[in-house]
Amino acid sequence: MAEKTLLDDPTKEPAVVRFVKDERSEVQKVEWPSRKDTRNLTIVVLALTAVMAAALGTLDLLLTFLYTTFQGLIGG
């Protein structure tokens, strides 16, 4: 006896169709941030990125200076 397939039961929707419907439903439940909140958070991210870049750049310069200084003392 052959197994039943999806085509044998027309009342059952395919998994892909069910997935897309469920996803659409979930996206409608999301509470999206306002334009003002998005702008403010973007500014915060850009500011923190600039601060971290400056801090890492300064650390890199300091470590490079120390490395070349010690290398000169050792005679390498």
Image: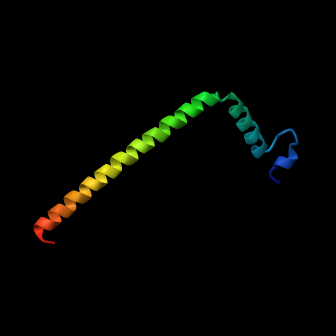
Asked if one can make out residue 33 in the rendered structure from this viewpoint, the answer is no
Choose between 10 and 59: the one closer to the eye: 59
Q: Residue at x 58, y 29 (%)?
A: 37
Q: Position of residue 51 (x, y in %)?
A: 39, 42
Residue at the extreme bottom of the image, as rendered? 76
Q: Residue at x 71, y 38 (%)?
A: 23
Q: Position of residue 71 (x, y in %)?
A: 17, 66
The quadrant where residue 52 appears: top left
Judge whether 6 appears above or below 36 on screen: below
Choose between 31 and 40: the one closer to the eye: 40
Judge whether 12 appears above or below 64 on screen: above
Q: Position of residue 45 (x, y in %)?
A: 49, 39
Asked if one can make out residue 72 in the rendered structure from this viewpoint, the answer is yes
Drawn side of residue 19 relative to residue 5, left or right: left
Residue at the extreme left of the image, as rendered? 74
Q: Position of residue 29 (x, y in %)?
A: 68, 28
Q: Residue at x 11, y 68 (%)?
A: 74
Drawn side of residue 66 relative to residue 40, left or right: left
Drawn side of residue 62 relative to residue 6, left or right: left
The quadrant where residue 10 appears: top right
Drawn side of residue 67 relative to residue 48, left or right: left
Choose between 22 and 4: the one closer to the eye: 22
Q: Number of labelled discs?
A: 0
Q: Residue at x 60, y 28 (%)?
A: 36
Figure colour scheme: rainbow
- Quadrant of the snapshot with the C terminus: bottom left
